[in-house]
Image (tube, rainbow, N blue to C red):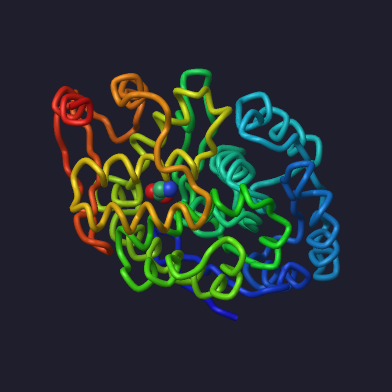
Amino acid sequence: MKKIRINTSSPYDVIIERGMLENCGKYIADTVKSRTAVIITDDKVNSLYGDTVKKSMEENGFKVDIFEFPNGEKSKNSDTLNKIYDFLCEKNITRSDILVALGGGVVGDITGFASATFLRGIDFIQIPTTLLAQIDSSVGGKTAIDLKGGKNLVGAFKQPELVICDSNTLKTLTPEFLSDGMAEAIKYGMIRDKNLFESIAGHNLENIDEIMDDMVYTCIDIKRDVVEHDEFDTGERMILNFGHTLGHAVEGYYNYSTYTHGCGVAVGMAMITKKFCPEEIYNKLIKCLENYKLPVSVPVSAEKLLPFCSKDKKRSSGNISYIVCREIGKAEIIKTSVEDFNALMGE
Ligand code: GLY
């Protein structure tokens, strides 16, 4: 078993081990005092893993209820959140009880936000079951729901008590979901770790399982380091958004229906690298993204995408911060006016 301690304002462990879902109740019982829990999950994940997690928790003395909602980003809204709050009231959940987020990024984000706000805050555990959630969204304490005006516009920082990553759960992912997470793994290599990048570049969707546990560990460890230095996202943490400013624009331009988050990030990384970095770096990045069946461009001009950057949370008072990697493994944060950014990208 691999373990990473995240030393944020409220410290916690991330544990990584294949097959540990069946024993997750033991690790949760060792971490929290409460023995009353609500698992929050979606219909797909519930049918795959809901019973396993519930059974393991019950065997370790927990009283467990499950709240399920329809899978997909369309559920990450105030309607679902209100249903979660109502369910928690119905089950008489108190401040000393816990929530368990069992699923991908949507489940983790909305459960985290419910836990940050219900009764002004109750503890929660993350059991991420997608690659993207394991290496990114379950660690670091960002929680949110979407508004009609954009993604993740209402949220809170709330660190979990424990994160449990079982890479066996990644075996049930469709190739599209695996690609989605690989975009974030490639991002970690680009911003911080040349060896990680080379190792990912030397594999593909068919054989990535060979290095999965080490890759998940390395990605989470990079995130740990970044988040420990800048938990509340006022500086260095922005490097985690390499490819995201344009990536969010790609997702938004297509109304969040054509490109997944990872595909948007892949296009965003490719566009920004093509514009600002040596051709050799761009070519390596493109080749690696293509290994994982990720897109490297979209059939729409930068001018049309740029208005969709305007909702980027890295924008403030007419300025925008974007990330470039002129060398593999090294990221720079560049702050510029929105006008200059638009002019540079539109050239
Ligand atoms: N997903 C980017 C961050 O946690 O800051």
Describe residue 101's horizontal placement relative to residue 13 as left or right. Answer: right
Question: At 35% across and 73% down in the image, what residue appears?
Answer: 195
Report x, y in % for residue 25: 75, 68
Coordinates of residue 259 in the picture (x, y in percent): 53, 34
Residue, x 84% and y 49% (percent of image)? 47
User: Quarter of the image containing the C terminus?
Assistant: top left
Q: Is residue 124 above or below residue 306?
A: below
Left or right: residue 341 versus residue 174 is: left
Which one is nearer the viewer's eye here, 176 or 252? 176
Q: Is residue 113 above or below residue 207?
A: above
Residue 6 in the image: x percent, y percent? 44, 66
* Direction bottom: furthest residue: 1
Label total for image: 0
- The answer to whether residue 317 is seen in the rendering is no
Q: Residue at x 23, y 48 (%)?
A: 324
Going by the image, does 297 lie left or right of 333? Answer: right
Quadrant into which the N terminus falls: bottom right
